């Protein structure tokens, strides 16, 4: 029986349940130094000096670094969606002459134990002349640096005749919508442990996550190391959500210090630092207009928005703005469209991505707009959605623009079909009647519905090597990364399915740059699609090889053989242990595969919330929450449901509970 | 600040004597001085509960206690839950019901749940929800954690 589609229990869980996981803070090597970062307490100002004499005099101090010590290290570059000319907005690893957000690293201290490192960091005195901070992304742009505006870029995606659409509109519905700034906040904070290996001269960075291969290249370039002198290693990772594992100043400083100080250097972020220094996301202001006909059909959609990028452009470049523009039309036809996104620098923690970048924002704006259209025209919001859906028969459906370097072509989709099926399943009419009755009785209760189009399976490639060892173990080496989503289990299921073996002898390796030359990591919901497809190909190749070798040994044609459990068997005849087959070749059997994809896939779904507001306290209670989702073929339904439930919880948090508020005032000079 | 002193306590049934600064947190003492890194630090200010351990059978945030306060106590951590290869019913239930994703909060939830079920194996779901809400998980959305603890309680009642 195939292992695909079965809710097998996770291979990852035993060490995590018994306390034997290896998260970043759990890594210790002899003779380690501990780094502590001194951060700006001011949102915007001129950094005129750093008092480090007292810190240097502390008996536990090994080194104190300021911008001068990092002068040869370039700012952190763009991993995704670079736009030429944005280099000036990159973040230096230590602030040089200017600070742009509370939390910006201004110095790093190194000590022999972490408590001393904190003591010493408190002795470093940044001298900052505060300037008036910019907190409003929609305010008029000002100067970021000589010759560079705080409007770093304007992204426009458009098609169709928008003017004509608005000219012939039955009605125009306009909204201003603000999305609060918040972030992923994984439960494990960031961490980095850099070790210069003595005999080999290889620098090893532990605590890597998400994109170890990319970060290896970036670090090698920044530190002037040949690529073969640096490796990144991912251990257990306590949650990702887009923000963990990107390249940050602290990773670079840890590596540079291990090289220069000649001792291993460990840095573990505390939660306060995490909340001011790790990527935030989603702060944007949208002004959106729809031109509609009398049936609620959208003739044209015009959205202008201002994305609050914070103090610098980080590794994601302008990806959040780009994806917001690209994904806003979602499941609807929208014959004429324009989206203009302003990437604005402010004096807040810099932004990156957070779970569903661009789709969270776009889905909120679009679905609010649909409800407003229905409200204005006195139509049923379900009917308005139906009227605007792209038909199943129009698939594959091309939008006339790209995102993440790929043309947007919705691969499949039966939006109307899913919505009907789902409404029927949840008993929408009954829910609606119940809510109407309760409202009549004076309760403040409502039902809301949002439809979304997601994207997944971002390419361009993934490599996999599968090896059957002489002891019969099967190693699946991938360039993927695990941030807690169950990568090992899913890859093992796909491998076992392809080979015909059980799961118990399969080991999945990920996040180790010394085990495989290339890898894309884990982001953009890509691993099951991309890495999984590469595992499928490699497993088929290895199976072919296995049967050929076994056929020779058993003097049988390969097509009369099958793999079951840990043996190759001749139908109704003798069998051979997998280990014996591998040994007969003089060692092991290996198959390599690469899977490439030029286009993403576009799953889609619908969420329904039934929410009550308490009249007296204004407390909000989410009474019911439903998700309908076309996920395609689920490799492990239990894990898919786990991801959806976790995502729904984070979405509810983002909508109702989570926001980072910034209060601006000009402080007196700090000396 | 750096005058170290001895702390004698029992960790997972084993007597330990460690020498620590008075300001050292119990969590750091367990992790660094006892080598028990299963107790995780998520926030270090008593909010997330990832560092929950049992001190004389009471759940405590080990980030909010000094190690010296544990003098003479019995501490239980996640490392002491399984009996050799045999998982504690709560560990087994978390595995069976997908009660963890990244697993970082899991030791804290397990220890919290142990204390809850040791007090009342028949705890009703609303009370259990309330008790479990003292810890944070960022991955699961909590539904499967609740399901896991209910399943473990049923198993332990047998």
Image (cartoon, grey):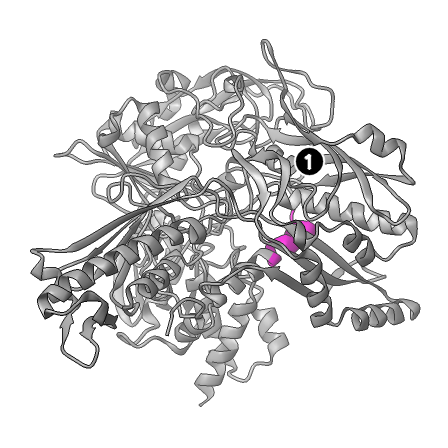
Residue A440 shown left or right of residue A215 in the figure: right
* Helix, strand or loop for the magenta stretch, by majority: helix
Res B78 quadrant in image: bottom left
Asked whether residue B38 appears in the rendered view, the answer is yes
Answer few, some or many: residues within 10 Å of disc 1's Cα (few below 14, many 20 plus, some between 14 and 19).
many
Chain of the residue under label 1: A
Image: magenta residue range: A648-658
Name the residue at 21% across, 71% down. A560
Residue A359 shown left or right of residue B51 in the figure: right
Q: Is residue A488 above or below residue A86?
A: below
Name the residue at 19% across, 66% down. A558
Q: Is residue B5 above or below residue A310?
A: below
Res A447 quadrant in image: bottom right
Please provide percent x and percent y for residue A153: 62, 22
Please provide percent x and percent y for residue A665: 69, 27
Please provide percent x and percent y for residue A383: 82, 57
Where's the C terminus of chain B, which quadrant?
bottom left
Res A535 quadrant in image: bottom left
Q: Nearer the viewer, residue A654 or B66?
A: A654
Residue A56 belongs to magenta span: no
Q: Nearer the viewer, residue A615 or A520?
A: A520
Q: Secondary structure at mark 1?
A: strand
Name the residue at 69% across, 50% down. A655
Residue A416 shown left or right of residue A410 in the figure: right
Label 1 belongs to which residue?
A284
Residue A482 shown left or right of residue A438 in the figure: left
Where's the N terminus of chain B, which quadrant?
top left
């Amino acid at each position: 029986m195939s292992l695909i589609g079965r809710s097998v229990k996770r291979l990852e869980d035993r060490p995590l349940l018994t306390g034997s996981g290896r998260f970043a803070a759990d890594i210790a090597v002899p003779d380690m130094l501990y780094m502590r970062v001194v951060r700006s307490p001011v949102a915007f100002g001129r950094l005129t000096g750093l008092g480090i004499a007292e810190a240097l005099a502390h008996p536990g101090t090994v080194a104190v670094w300021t911008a001068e010590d990092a002068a040869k290290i370039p700012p952190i570059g763009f991993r995704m969606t670079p736009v030429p000319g944005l280099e000036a907005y990159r973040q230096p690893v230590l602030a040089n002459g200017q600070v742009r957000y509370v939390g910006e690293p201004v110095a790093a201290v190194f000590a022999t134990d972490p408590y001393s490192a904190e003591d010493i960091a408190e002795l470093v005195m940044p001298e900052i002349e505060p300037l008036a901070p910019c907190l409003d992304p929609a305010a008029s742009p000002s100067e970021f640096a000589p010759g560079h505006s705080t409007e770093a870029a304007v992204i426009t995606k458009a098609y169709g005749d928008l003017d004509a659409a608005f000219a012939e509109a039955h009605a125009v519905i306009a909204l201003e919508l603000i999305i609060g700034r918040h972030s992923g906040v994984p439960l494990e904070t960031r961490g980095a442990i850099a070790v210069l290996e003595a005999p080999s001269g290889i620098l090893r960075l532990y605590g890597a996550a998400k994109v170890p291969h990319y970060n290896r290249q970036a670090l090698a370039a920044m530190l002037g190391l040949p690529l073969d002198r640096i490796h990144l290693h991912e251990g257990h990772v306590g949650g990702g959500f887009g923000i963990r594992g990107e390249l940050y100043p602290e990773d670079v400083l840890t590596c540079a210090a291990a090289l220069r100080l000649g001792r291993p250097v460990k840095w573990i972020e505390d939660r306060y630092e995490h909340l001011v220094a790790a990527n935030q996301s989603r702060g944007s202001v949208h002004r959106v207009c729809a031109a509609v006909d009398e049936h609620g059909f959208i003739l044209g959609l015009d959205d202008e928005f201002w994305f609050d990028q914070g103090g610098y452009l980080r590794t994601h470049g302008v990806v959040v703005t780009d994806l917001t523009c690209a994904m806003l039309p979602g499941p609807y036809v929208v014959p004429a469209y324009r989206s203009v996104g302003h990437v604005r620098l402010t004096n807040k923690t810099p932004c990156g991505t957070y779970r569903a970048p661009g789709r969270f924002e776009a889905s909120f704006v679009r679905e609010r707009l649909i409800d407003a259209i229905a409200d204005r025209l006195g139509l049923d919001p379900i009917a308005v959605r139906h009227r605007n859906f792209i038909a199943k028969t129009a698939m594959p459906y091309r939008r006339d623009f790209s995102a993440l370097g790929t043309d947007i072509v919705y691969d499949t989709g039966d939006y109307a079909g899913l919505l009907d099926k789902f409404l029927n399943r949840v008993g929408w009419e009954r829910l609606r009647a119940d809510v109407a009755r309760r409202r009549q009785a004076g309760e403040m209760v409502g039902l809301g519905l949002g439809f979304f189009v997601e994207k997944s399976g971002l390419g361009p490639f993934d490599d996999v090597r599968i090896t059957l060892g002489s002891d019969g173990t099967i190693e699946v080496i991938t360039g993927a990364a695990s941030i807690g989503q169950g990568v090992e289990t899913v890859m093992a299921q796909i491998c076992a399915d392809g080979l015909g073996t059980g799961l118990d002898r399969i080991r999945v390796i990920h996040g180790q740059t010394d085990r495989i030359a290339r890898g894309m990591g884990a982001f953009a919901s890509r691993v099951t699609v991309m890495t999984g497809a590469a595992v499928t190909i490699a497993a088929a190749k290895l199976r072919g090889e296995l049967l050929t070798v076994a056929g020779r040994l058993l003097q049988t044609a390969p097509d009369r053989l099958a793999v079951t459990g840990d043996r190759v068997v001749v139908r109704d005849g003798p069998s051979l242990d997998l280990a014996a087959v591998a040994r007969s070749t003089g060692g092991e059997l290996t198959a390599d595969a690469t899977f490439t994809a030029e286009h993403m896939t576009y799953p889609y779904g619908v969420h329904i919330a039934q929410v009550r507001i308490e009249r007296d306290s204004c407390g909000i209670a989410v009474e019911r929450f439903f998700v309908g989702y076309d996920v395609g073929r689920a490799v492990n339904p239990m894990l898919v449901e786990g991801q959806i439930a976790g995502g729904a919880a984070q979405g509810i948090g983002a909508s109702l509970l989570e926001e980072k508020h910034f209060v601006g005032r000009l402080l007196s000079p700090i000396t | 600040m750096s005058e170290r002193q001895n702390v004698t306590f029992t960790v997972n049934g084993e007597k330990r004597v460690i020498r620590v600064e008075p300001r050292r947190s119990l969590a750091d003492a367990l992790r660094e001085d006892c080598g028990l890194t299963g107790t995780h630090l998520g926030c270090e200010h008593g909010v997330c509960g990832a560092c929950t351990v049992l001190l004389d059978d009471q759940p405590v945030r080990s980030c909010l206690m000094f190690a010296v306060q544990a003098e003479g106590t019995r501490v239980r951590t996640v490392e002491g839950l399984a009996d050799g290869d045999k998982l504690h019913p709560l560990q087994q239930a978390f595995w069976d019901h997908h009660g963890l994703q990244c697993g970082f909060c899991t030791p804290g939830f397990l220890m919290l749940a142990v204390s809850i079920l040791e007090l009342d194996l028949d705890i009703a779901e609303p009370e259990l929800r309330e008790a479990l809400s003292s810890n944070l998980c960022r991955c699961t959305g909590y539904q499967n954690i609740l399901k896991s603890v209910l399943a473990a309680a049923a198993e332990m009642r047998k």
